[in-house]
């Protein structure tokens, strides 16, 4: 019998999909407006690329949310772990280096939080 997906992991996929798609769309479509709101210079076109990647990860979580067994979502959880751990480390590096504004702690917290939840789910499976 195939192992089903826990309700906690399903909820994580849904929250990650909503947050990822919303943040990704903002960075892809209106990075300067987001930057002005957060007092963060996002004029660099790389923010649009980061937005596109964030949308892609959000969509993968949406697709995983619709799945019903672990084997169908295992690779998504593995990819999310890589993305959230490395993303959190990159943001932390920028914060400690002084290259990012204080509001980037929110990004760090989101990525680190998702890394913990995805890591916990992976370890339990």
Image: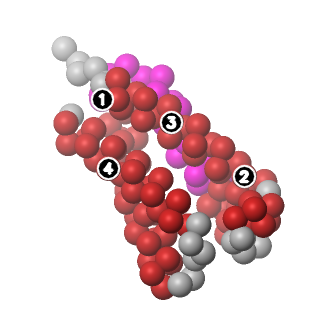
Which residue carries the number 4 mark?
116
Which picture quadrant has residue 88? bottom left
Residue at point 20%, 42% (across, down): 123
Give the structural element (helix, strand or loop) at label 2.
Answer: helix
Which residue carries the number 3 mark?
15
Which segment did they paint magenta?
Answer: 52-71
Residue at point 53%, 59% (across, down): 106
Q: Which mark is residue 120?
A: none
Camera sees residue 113: yes
First in sequence: mark 1 vs mark 4: 1
85 is higher (above) or lower (below) than 96: above
Give the structural element (helix, strand or loop) at label 1.
Answer: helix
Number of other residues with Cα within 10 Å of mark 1, as a class: few under 14, some 14 to 19, many 20 or more: some
* Residue contact at pointers 1 and 4, CB within 8 angstroms: no
First in sequence: mark 4 vs mark 3: 3
Q: Which mark is residue 26?
A: 2
Number of other residues with Cα within 10 Å of mark 4, as a class: few under 14, some 14 to 19, many 20 or more: some
Number of other residues with Cα within 10 Å of mark 3, as a class: few under 14, some 14 to 19, many 20 or more: some
* Residue contact at pointers 2 and 4, CB within 8 angstroms: no
Instruction: Between residue 63 and residue 39, name the one nearer to us.
Output: 39
What percent of the width, then of the height, locates residue 107? 53, 60
First in sequence: mark 2 vs mark 4: 2
Q: Report the predominant secondary structure element of the magenta stretch.
A: helix
Side of 33 where 2 appears, left or right? left
- Alpha carbon of mark 1 to alpha carbon of mark 4: how far? 20 Å
Q: Nearer the viewer, mark 3 or mark 1?
A: 3
- Alpha carbon of mark 2 to alpha carbon of mark 3: how far? 17 Å
Residue at point 58%, 37% (across, down): 18
Q: Is residue 70 magenta?
A: yes
């Amino acid at each position: 019998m195939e192992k089903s997906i826990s309700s906690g992991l399903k909820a994580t996929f849904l929250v990650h999909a909503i947050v990822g798609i919303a943040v990704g769309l903002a960075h892809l479509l209106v990075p300067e407006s987001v930057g002005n709101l957060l007092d963060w210079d996002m004029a660099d076109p790389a923010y649009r690329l980061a937005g596109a990647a964030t949308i892609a990860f959000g969509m993968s979580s949406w697709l995983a949310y619709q799945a019903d067994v672990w084997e169908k979502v295992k690779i998504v959880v593995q990819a999310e772990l890589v993305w959230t751990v490395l993303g959190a480390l990159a943001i932390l590096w920028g914060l400690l280096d002084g290259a990012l504004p204080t509001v980037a702690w929110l990004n760090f917290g989101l990525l680190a939080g998702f890394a913990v939840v995805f890591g916990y789910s992976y370890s339990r499976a």
